[in-house]
Every structure is written in C-alpha cells, then in structure tokens.
Amino acid sequence: MIAEASACVGLLSDARYPRLALQHREEFISSDPFPHTVIDDFLPISVARELAEYMPVPTDDNYPWVVSKKPDAVKQYVHHEPSMPLPIRQIFRELNSHQGLLFFELLTGTESLLPDPYLVGGGMHISGSGDFLGIHVDFNWHHKLLAYRRINAILYLTEGWDESWGGATELWSCDGTERRREIPPRFNRLLVFETSENSYHGHPAPLELPENVFRRTLNIYYYHRHTRTGDPETTEPHWTNYKTEASPFADSLLADYSKSVD
C-alpha cells in the first residue's frame, strides 16, 4: 500500500513534465476564448488508475462532503486534505510542490504562482447522474492567502467515459453569451485555464450516467499576489516593498527547469 502510494512523490521531477509544459505553452497562451490547454495522458496510467480507485463514492459518509444543491449547480466535493485517501493527498502535495509550481509557471507563462494548501473550492469533486455545474466565473480572492486566483487545473479520473453521458467542460465567450469549446472529461486528461472576470465555464446539462458511475475530478487552483497587467491596481498589505518583477533567483529556477527536458 505505502509503496504504491509513493509513486506520486517526486512525479513532476521527471523530465517529461517540463517538456509537456513547453509543448503546450503556446496553445495555452493563444487559445480562444481565454488562455487554456488540454493535456492528455497527464499521469502514468498506473498512477491515474490508482487515484481513480481511491476516489470515494458520494454516499460514503466517511468523508466531509461539501454538498451544493442550488438552482445553478448540483455537485459535491471534499477539500479537507487530511481526510483524503493517502494517494490523493500525495498527488495534491505533488501538484502544490516546488516542481508543480514550476510546471504551471512554465506552461502558463505566469511567474511567482502560489499554491493553495487549503484547497479552497478544490479537492475531490464527484458528480452523479442529474448533477450539473452552470456556466459561471470563479471567485477571485483567497481570504487565507490574501492573493488573487489565477489558474485552474482539473484532472479527469473516470475511466471509460462515454461522451453521450455529457459532462464536457464548456468554455464560453468572455461576455458569457456563446459556447466556444467543449472538453470531454476523458480519463487522465488535464485541463488548465486562466481564471479571470470573464473566464466563463461549466458543464450545465444534467449528467446522464449509468448506475454507480460518477464524473470524478481532482481540482486544484493557483494564486498570485498581484492583479494582472492592465487590471486596476490594488492597495495591498506589505512589509518589505520589493519590485513585482521576478528576482534573478526566480528567473534562474525557471530557466533550470526548462533545461531539464534535455
């Protein structure tokens, strides 16, 4: 059990991941309707299957489910990391690690990302038949980190997904009036997109799933201490005032990470 679970530890140190980040960087930056990319076969298949195996079912009362039953969303999730199965705890820690941050910084072109160890709004998301998530824009401020939400990453973990069941993540135009792209939740697929005041997305049609089949995802979000270039400046608490440009040390970390594909 412990030996299998440890497969997640150090996973993003493999040279495959900076290579993936570089391969998908231009697609992320240039995609319509807002920056995003889709990476298939993100994890080794054995790791992805192990994570899927440990995902609980919504009726398992051993987990502190956050349940939403609103007119615009029916879903449930667990964001309390200490209560999660060990392999899932480990993959979240890996995604929030030094190498995880460098991966998402290189992929998105966003320097100085902050992880969210609290997994606010993230964690294990599980939807059953009839569940849906209306088209929406995410919250933009983390009250514990005192930082702006910047990047969403969603890993899909239902093996053998049939697209007739629905559940595709829809990306809508920046005015929220037109669907621009549908991304089916294929197993071991990672969707990464920039969150902003106009990054409308969701899966609004109720799922049509067979019995005991669920739409399973791991959701993780990344933050930044400053607003985007061009956004109104915000007065922030501070101690030492540094310039907002990356330091030489930060630049060298990202440069070394990029070179590790060789």
Image (tube, grey):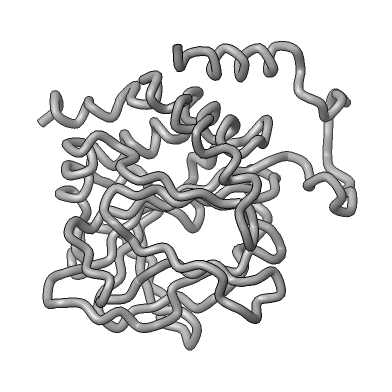
In the figure, is residue 104 to the left or right of 185? right
| Quadrant position of the C terminus in the picture | top left
Residue at position x 62%, y 15% from top? 255
Q: Residue lying furthest bottom in this view?
A: 71
Work out whether residue 107 or residue 239 is closer to the camera in this orientation and state it.
107
Residue at position x 43%, y 73% from top? 203
Q: How many marks?
A: 0
In the figure, is residue 130 to the left or right of 110? left
Residue 74 sits above or below residue 235 on the image:
below
> Image quadrant of residue 128?
bottom left
Residue 149 percent coordinates (x, y): 64, 50
Residue 228 percent coordinates (x, y): 78, 47
In the figure, is residue 74 to the left or right of 238? left
Residue 57 percent coordinates (x, y): 19, 63
In the figure, is residue 24 to the left or right of 194? left
Residue at position x 59%, y 32% from top? 105
